[in-house]
Amino acid sequence: MAKAVLGIIGGSGVYDLPGLEDLREERIPSPWGEPSDALRFGRVGHTEVVFLPRHGRGHSYSPSDINYRANIDVMKRAGVTDLISVSACGSFREELYPGMFVLVDQYVDRTHKREHSFFGKGCVAHVPFGHPVGPLLQKRLAAAAAAEGLPFRLDGTYVCIEGPQFSTYAESMTYKGLGYDVIGMTAMPEAKLAREAEITYATVAMVTDFDCWHPEHDNVDVASVVAVARANAAKAATLVARVARDFPSEHEPCPAGSDRALDGAIMTARSMLEPRLLEKLDAVAGRVLGAR
């Protein structure tokens, strides 16, 4: 079994991860371009932790401008086996109130401007994605939240929109009517790319607002979102620290198949594989392409 290395991607309001021991920073180059920031390496107890602020320090990247491929690629190069995404979100349900964490298990992708795959012309691959969240990692998050007395809901559907604008009222009512639970701007294509990179992935969706469907909270603005996000950041740090402290030393095989998502996924014949693309895929798909 592989050594477990826990990766954390922090969203709005989560630009640092306090409490890491033996902290160091490193900028790992990626053939996919520039990641959002330098990686911060540290330790919580016996668990190695790698942290990356999704929007960069100072929040310089909008959801559409984030280089998701580079972010996941450098996490893979850093040895990350399990990745927790911490993301601010809006809620479509009264019971999912600002300050609550939703440990989602499904996503709906409504983005349209982003690179959604490491693969393409020269190396075509199709990975299974029916169950995008690692169930064991999700359960560890739930156990940590319960142990720390943090309000949370297990399972839920996260609809990811392009942004950077918040939803119209018509859009918000449509998503609510479709039964979605929360709305955000960053889980996609991050979750898809993590699956292609064979990294177990889970999202902690931090509710900051009720989107604009709510008759008493119909105006979503940055000031109110940031205020709740900052309050959530301390709770998120507590949650992540507890998960890391209780994390196994060896990576647990993922029942959702993330560890071996590329088995049988490469469709392109060996003779047709594009050498330049293969070089870029050395970290993400080296396990299967190196043996082909």
Image: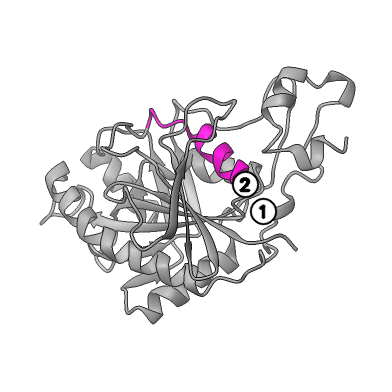
Up-down relation of residue 162 to residue 249 (above or below):
above
Upstream in sequence: badge 2 or badge 1: 2
Q: Position of residue 289 (x, y in %)?
A: 81, 35
Q: Where does label 1 land, which residue? A: 258
The answer to whether 277 appears left or right of 95 in the picture is: right
Residue at point 34% right, 38% down? 55
Find the magenta span and give its range: 64-78
Q: Main secondary structure of the magenta part?
A: helix
Q: Position of residue 7 (x, y in %)?
A: 51, 53
Q: Are marks 2 and 1 in contact (CB under 8 Å)?
A: yes
Q: Position of residue 28 (x, y in %)?
A: 53, 35
The amino acid sitting under disc 1 is: Ser
Residue at point 66% right, 48% down? 198
Q: How is the image coloured?
A: one colour
Q: Which mark is residue 8?
A: none
- Please name whichever residue, 266 or 173, is drawn nearer the observer in this view of the structure: 266
The amino acid sitting under disc 2 is: Arg
Residue at point 21% right, 55% down? 230
Look at the numbered disc 2 and give the secondary structure of its residue: helix
- Please name whichever residue, 180 or 149, is drawn nearer the observer in this view of the structure: 149
The quadrant in which the N terminus is found is bottom right
Taking the magenta stretch, the answer to whether it contains residue 260 is: no
The quadrant in which the C terminus is found is top right
Q: Where does label 2 land, which residue? A: 195
Q: Position of residue 242 (x, y in %)?
A: 42, 72
